[in-house]
Image: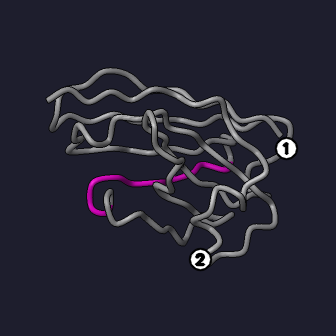
């Protein structure tokens, strides 16, 4: 499976962006999917995840209430709607997928995902 993230850009603090991740090669419904981000000099960190059919989601505390993860399996797509962006949200955002990741604490770990998109830069200016 291949993942292609898009939608990043430069936005002022308080603004919004919507990231998309296109899934190809396999049907998206086979995969638990998530968003991670990595700021310069920092480790890759969990942002949000969604179950294969989408009824359940999980968010990092730092984005809860501001970000919404969703998916459209008919379109083989994953989304991350980001509101009230802060300068500390600045990072490269990656979409990730795995067919066997169990839903739980391991969902938050980058090592639980075998497939990654190339990343899209989000920059929030103050």
The residue tagged 1 is 26
Precedes in sequence: disc 1 or disc 2: 1
Image spot of residue 37 (x, y percent): 49, 43
| Closer to viewer: mark 1 or mark 2 | 2
Instruction: Categorize mark 2 by other alpha carbons within 10 Å: few (<14), some (14-19), many (20+).
Output: few
Main secondary structure of the magenta stretch:
strand
Q: Position of residue 103 (x, y in %)?
A: 65, 75
Q: Measuring 58% from the left and 45% from the top, which residue is drawn there?
A: 78
- In the picture, the quarter occupied by the C terminus is top left
Quadrant in the picture for residue 118 = top right
Write down the region rendered in magenta: 64-73
Q: Nearer the viewer, residue 16 or 35?
A: 35
Please provide percent x and percent y for residue 109. 62, 63
Location of mark 2 (residue): 105
Numbered disc total: 2
Residue 18 - label = none
Q: Residues within 10 Å of mark 1 (few under 14, many from 20)?
A: few
Residue in view at x 76 percent, y 45 percent: 115
| The N terminus, quarter of image | top right
Left or right: residue 17 versus residue 72 is: left
Q: Is residue 3 above or below residue 65?
A: above
Helix, strand or loop at disc 2?
A: helix
- What's the residue at 68%, 63% (across, down)? 52
**In the image as oriented, which residue stretches furthest toward the bottom?**
104
Residue at the far front in the pictured view: 41
Q: Looking at the picture, how far across and down is residue 29, in whole percent?
A: 74, 56
């Amino acid at each position: 499976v291949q993942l292609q993230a898009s939608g990043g850009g430069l936005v002022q603090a308080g603004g919004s962006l919507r990231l998309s991740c296109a899934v190809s090669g396999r049907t998206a419904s086979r995969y638990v999917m998530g968003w991670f981000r990595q700021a310069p000099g920092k480790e890759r960190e969990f942002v949000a995840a969604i179950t294969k059919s989408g009824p359940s989601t999980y968010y990092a505390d730092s984005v809860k209430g501001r970000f919404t993860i969703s998916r459209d399996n008919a379109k083989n797509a994953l989304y991350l709607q980001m509101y009230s962006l802060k300068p500390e949200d600045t990072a490269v955002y990656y979409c990730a997928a795995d067919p066997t990741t169990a839903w739980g604490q391991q969902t938050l770990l980058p090592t639980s995902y075998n497939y990654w998109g190339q990343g899209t830069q989000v920059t929030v200016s103050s």
